[in-house]
Image: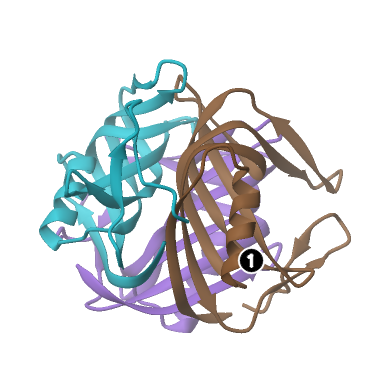
Chain colours: A brown, B purple, C cyan
Amino acid sequence: MEFKAGRTFLFRVPAGEDLLEAINRSAESRGIKTGVVMGIGSLRNPVVGYYSEEEKRYRSIELSGTFELLSLNGNISLKDGKPFAHLHVTLGDEEGRVFGGHLIRGEVFVAEVYIEELIGKPLERKDMGNNLWLWETER
Amino acid sequence: MEFKAGRTFLFRVPAGEDLLEAINRSAESRGIKTGVVMGIGSLRNPVVGYYSEEEKRYRSIELSGTFELLSLNGNISLKDGKPFAHLHVTLGDEEGRVFGGHLIRGEVFVAEVYIEELIGKPLERKDMGNNLWLWETER
Amino acid sequence: MEFKAGRTFLFRVPAGEDLLEAINRSAESRGIKTGVVMGIGSLRNPVVGYYSEEEKRYRSIELSGTFELLSLNGNISLKDGKPFAHLHVTLGDEEGRVFGGHLIRGEVFVAEVYIEELIGKPLERKDMGNNLWLWETER
């Protein structure tokens, strides 16, 4: 799917907020239906998911402590008609070891987030019957 | 090298395809000569490379199982006159541990890929004589 | 904060240079006040930081050897009136294990860097009194 570049936003999420909720709220209040997301920062007690093909569900991995947010990558599209951010993260601990997964939850200590809006026919996530909500593959 | 922003694409690669081949094909069929690539998803049995300065070649690292694709970063430029994607990945396992390298191969379970085309004088990869194909450094 | 997309740059940093210094110099010589940064490559003997909330300072983590630069993510804004890159990295070793943190130092073996300039009211980093220089949160 081809899009036109829309608005761009670079901002800091205040400490104490949940990163995923903050990005979803930002997309909704700005009317961003489609976009890409990038960011860095530091998260407290992040919870990430691993999707098990066998079990057809996400397993939760709870990390304890404050982690450098080394990469935040993903996109915004529509789910149930509302903007929905699908984000993956890598996280570094005090010895430089790295953990990561699908972002489920994480309290912001610092988060510097970039969103680029894409203008075009909206992408809609649909239930694939295995706890995954995906876009149809139209290229 | 300065470029103008070109077209932007956000799309899902169908399950079962090889991620690298799918991105190269997408660039070729769309006529993208230069661009940047970002993405997330989940890959089966990915193979990544580590370039050894001493041995002057890539070593292959074969990972077994399905991994969250936590970050997919890289670019598209020309090699032998054709669009060529140079991509690095980080991959998360079921316990949140992270592995990664230069993307050699990986079967898509889910892949949500963003490509931004850049318009300008094409960047060409040239053989540096050490199994590395690089752009000349022009800044 | 909303910005307009400015110029875009994709370039290779010559081997032997320090990656962070090279990006800061690139931003300064091009007059980039605000932007986002992405990249991949390979770094020699990188040094990364972990910010300890308890100690209110960065701890340095020194890595020895050549690592694949799996992700380079961050932004450019102003600090003391000059362009300043805040960058996080993930790094892969010869067995595919991944380390990372806030980029302090790292000699380039290969670095392919993308910078997208953002045009708007400049973001200024201010001393928060805890060895962190952050933007005010204006959304």
Q: Quadrant of residue C125?
A: top left
The residue shown at (33%, 68%) is B77
Chain letter, disc 1 residue? A
Report whether A104 appears left or right of A36: right
The residue shown at (19%, 67%) is B1
| Whether residue A14 is situated above or below residue B114 in the rendered picture | above
Could you say where residue C75 lies in the image, as x and y percent from the top left?
A: 34, 51
Whether residue B101 is visible: no
| Whether residue C56 is situated above or below residue A107 in the rendered picture | above
Report whether C116 appears left or right of A14: left
| Whether residue C3 is situated above or below residue A71 in the rendered picture | below
Report whether B135 appears left or right of C138: left
- Observer-nearest of B62 and B39: B39
- Observer-nearest of B19 and B96: B96
Quarter of the image where the C terminus of chain A is located: bottom right
User: The residue tagged with tag 1: helix, strand or loop?
Assistant: helix
Could you say where residue B121 lies in the image, as x and y percent from the top left?
A: 22, 77
Mark 1 Cα within 10 Å, few/some/many (few <14, many 20+)?
some
The residue shown at (38%, 62%) is B75
Numbered label tally: 1
Quarter of the image where the N terminus of chain A is located: bottom right
Residue picked out by circle 1: A28
Whether residue B96 is visible: yes
